[in-house]
Amino acid sequence: MPARITAAQLGLVLGLVLVPLGCGTPNPAPTGAPTSSGASCPATAEPAPAAIPDWEPSAQDPTVIPIFVSSSGALACGPSRFVFTLIDRQNLPVAAPDRSASVAFYDLGKDPGTPVATHDGTFVWAIEGARGVYVVETSFTSSGLWGAEFKTAAPGAPSETIRAQFEVRPAPLVVSVGERAPASDTLTLADVGGDVTRISTDPRPVQAFYQTSIADAVAARKPFALVFATPKFCASAQCGPTLDRIKPIAAAHPELTVINVEPYELQNVDGQLQPVLTDGSLTPTAATNEWRLLSEPWVFVVDGSGVVRGSFEGIFGDEELERSIAAVIPAS
């Protein structure tokens, strides 16, 4: 019998799992909302615990524990990018290039014994040589309670199977692939007299990332990439690495406009950017709320018609982003 854990046990660990944004985030989409493609999403009735005994918590204690990196707002009916990592009982990362990891998805309300889809995870370094994740591209056919059966093996260690439950929403909370990009009015170098330190906490900023607002990029009807990231105030430790990963890719595509937006309201205090706090919490910007972000960092790729064609929560592989960019840049 495989060791089992519930989604509630998949805690925030390692400073790797994405951190929820502060106050001011939008409310979740209502139940029954359409998917981003406009199609309605069938809802599966939640099964009683007695109907899914093989998916209930077990006294068996796993030696390897899967951690959901994808936030609940990103897992929704239709195509989804499912990201997870692995830790041991001491909360130490064990995800690695030589450790295999696959996941089988079950619609627990429909058939808890037959997988809807099974995928091998693609390993991606989140922080090179230190922390990694596995990425799976899948599609959820209905909203409701789902199960993920993880199988993993590493050289010199026995294989292990672990099960967890999670919710699939009727529609994503965050702006998703297929939606029109909100034309948010964001700060640029022109707004601050060319002083990038007044709008960016990146210690090594690329000036070009701050020349165009989101609204202007949408109006220009040209492809662009949008990065919501704050290296200085990012609690997930992923904003700096995300920007650093974007920079060489942006340099290889000079025809692509790249925009970095700080997701929190900032103010200049004694010559340094400091966050504006609301009830002791970081305050999301208007753009952050318009894009319905519940965590950070995020990267979006938008085509020339203003439609989102790529969406990456926190951690991504170079090949993933390159494929998304290639899909929106006209062939020369």
Image: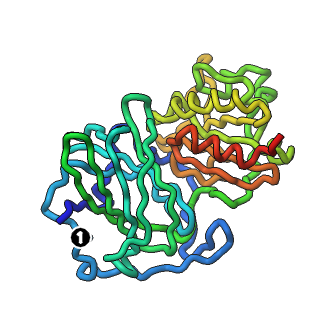
The quadrant of the rendering that contains the C terminus is top right
> Along the line of sight, which residue is nearer the eye, 234 or 259?
259
Q: Position of residue 261 (x, y in %)?
A: 66, 37
Residue at 65% x, 75% y is 39
The image quadrant that residue 61 belongs to is bottom left
Q: Is residue 53 above or below residue 267?
A: below
Q: Position of residue 72 (x, y in %)?
A: 46, 59
The quadrant of the rendering that contains the N terminus is bottom left
Residue of label 1: 56
Farthest-out residue, right? 220
**Is 93 left, or right, of 78 in this rendering?**
left
Residue at 22% x, 76% y is 53
At label 1, the amino acid type is Glu
Residue at 48% x, 35% y is 238
Farthest-out residue, top? 271
**Is 316 left, or right, of 249 in this rendering?**
left
Q: Is residue 133 above or below residue 62?
A: above
